[in-house]
Amino acid sequence: MTYCYVQCVKVSVDIMGGEFNIIDCISIYGTQIQIGGVFKRFKMNKSPIAPNTVKRKKLDDALSYFTEAREPIKVRGNLHLQLCLDSLENISTTKGLQPEHILELIDVIGTCKHAESISARLIKFLIPATFVPEKAIVKTISYLCTNKPSTNMQCLLLRWILVIYDYIDTKDDIHKLYGLIFFFLDNQTMMPYVCHLLFLLTRKEDVRMFRVRKLLSLQNRVGAQPYLIGLLSIYKLYYPNLVSMVLPKNKKLFFPSKDGKWKIVVEKVQLSRVNQNTLDTTVASERLQLADSSQIRGAPRSKRRKIDPVPIVHSNASSNIGNPGKDTVEAMLYKNKPFVQVSDLKALMQRPDYIEPPSQIGAVLRNELLQHYMSYSFDAVTVTRFSYWLQAILYEEILDRTVTVEDKERIDGLLTRVVSFSKFLQEGIPAVDQFLARFLHRWNGEDFRVHIFRLISYHRICSFQRLHDNILEPLRKLYFCSSVYFKCQVIHCLTALLHNLAAFEWPRVQESNKADEVDGQTPSILSSLFHEETEEFEGVVTLLELVRYISDMCVLGQQMDDSHNLLIHINLNFMELVASLFSQYNIPVVPFPVKDIFMRPFLLENAMGPARVCSIITMYKNSLELQKRQTIGTEYDEVINKKAIIRKCNDLILDVSDALLRNRAFTRKVDGSFFNFNPQDYSESLKVKEDVFTVYLHQAFLGFAMKFLKETQPIEQFGHPRGIKGVKETYFEFLEREHLDDIPKYNKVFIRKGNQSTTSAG
């Protein structure tokens, strides 16, 4: 027989269905319990109690211990208190509390019946299993007005409201207390949390002159604090004439969260709730992403709660949908129509100016109709709210926490939505650019790689120095210590960035400059949704410097990976884009990268390299000739030397033509030429002839030359490939049939018949 002894002080314990008050030492064996040396037999239940029932009973007992206590609970040496707190902590951090339980604990905390240490722990346990009733928040604010809770407790309650803000079912009654909450600004300790809560609740009708004066006086007293600037920035967006302060150009995080771990616990509880309902996470994510406002309104709120940083649009106004005759007088009091009542795009376009955006502005990432509203209305307040929300959520979800395996799926979904929204807008988001500026310096090159590269490609145009410090330098460090496949992804990403700057950002900058000259001009399709004051810079200089930087990375990457075919292919894609910047995107210059980037592709062992080099040179010639024919202003003459570019292009044309078509690879001894050397100067045993790089003897074309000879010559008269020199035109027709038409096209453009001279670019 084995006994288990526990020394404790009069505690009520459940043992297999029987309840006992343990006063002294106990020992349990089989169906007997020894209390104070006397054995007593108890009856065991035939069926075990369900774990959920046990937990529910423990929760009810713990709640009743705090709610039914008539006197302050003793803290020191109170084992019953510790057991109840442990039970509450275990249940709240794993399953969460129901709305009625949260209301009960709010009454216990607000009345301050018990010690402050107990109330502080109880606040930490206010973790919702589904949602937080609005009544609980109203009660909390009411208790703050009684001054019974200390300042530290009041701050902790405000922090709790901010942590669970997205899980509050409605916010209409909370907004009615806006003026009451505003008076808490007089408490300097509570000021940061009050400003954050007011920032989330502020509507246009809340901005009044006396409140602006109050905030400005507080700013004079405590200094330009970020939380005050954040609240004033919203006021300024609604009424610029009331707020005369100048907002900082670089928008920092106005309301940094100190409760990241608390939020993680809330999110885990929500996730466990979804898993308990046997809802597959992936399917739920797809349903939420595809659900429109009508589907969301029809679903029960408890089923819609999911561990997802992107909220869902909801409002009390949705309850009147389908009952047009109900509360018509109340509906007439509101000038604006809540967005949740907009059913489709047609209804949105009828009166877009009278639609009130939802308070859950982050829902724009999942709601396509809200995206159309945001991009069409050009509402500065809505855009700024979204920017602040996105900046805060990116910092909280990625930067301010250690990302675990469980977090990656959620963050992956968030970044997917951000990329999709950037693609919808066809422009970058300033909040994302600020996030990338911090994240890339600590990025390992692996986490969320696809999404990070996509977000980089949507980066907004800025000065090259800023682009270099924030984006290019972190990528360069990863580029030179990674595999060839990562190098290919980096060059592909930077090529997409260059395309975005040339196709969308550059025209947007030009249009913005014209709009500044003509006041009152209506925004066009290219106008930026995000108005951000940045330092003055030349967009052309940024493009030119970016081309030089990427071309240098391409050359070094080719040297490091021994001209890997995939890397060469990606580099040539970049070169094709650079060659077409003027002809396709009207960039007023034709940038010419370093000449070495053409050398290795030209000497490849497959025909893809030389053929695409010829195609790129043809594109350069067309762009330079088009630029020469058009009348271009002189404002960029100091930025780029056109004569030097034309000279470099002509040198490249002569080098390729001499080697590929004119049998003169080593005859042109000019500085900067590809073949500005004599092979026998390095080794006398090298028997390299001048026609070694011709279109029929080049190592990339030998296979095609032999195939051509087999098709055109009898086997007994099969000759050397040099014999193709006399039938080049027929050979070029053969190359066109083999899908290498870039070589014949190059020959037609640059080689004149007769004296076989080579034309230049201009």
Image (spheres, helix red, strand yellow):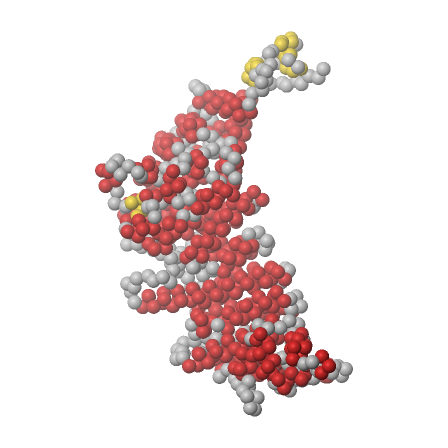
Residue 186 appearing in the image: no
Which residue is located at x 65 percent, y 77 percent? 711
Is residue 72 shown above or below 196?
A: above
Q: Where is residue 511 in the image (x, y as percent from the top left)?
A: 36, 66
Quadrant in the picture for the N terminus: top right
The answer to whether any part of residue 530 appears in the image is yes
- At horizontal 77% and vertical 82% (from top left) the residue drawn is 685
Q: In this view, does 408 lie above or below 270?
A: below
Number of marks drawn: 0
| Residue 218 relative to residue 125: left or right | left
Height in image: 331 above or below 41? below
Nearest the viewer among 687 and 435 is 687
* Residue for point 45% across, 25% down: 114
- Which residue sits furthest right? 685
Q: In this view, does 663 lie to the left or right of 72?
A: right
Percent across and percent down for residue 532 are 39, 59
**At which x and y percent is residue 258?**
48, 42
- Residue at left 59%, top 15%? 46
| Picture quadrant of residue 69 | top left
Q: Nearer the viewer, residue 336 or 212?
A: 336
Q: Kindly indicate the quadrant of the structure image that contains residue 177.
A: top left
Q: Position of residue 166 (x, y in %)?
A: 42, 40
Whether residue 378 sits left or right of residue 406 in the image: it is left
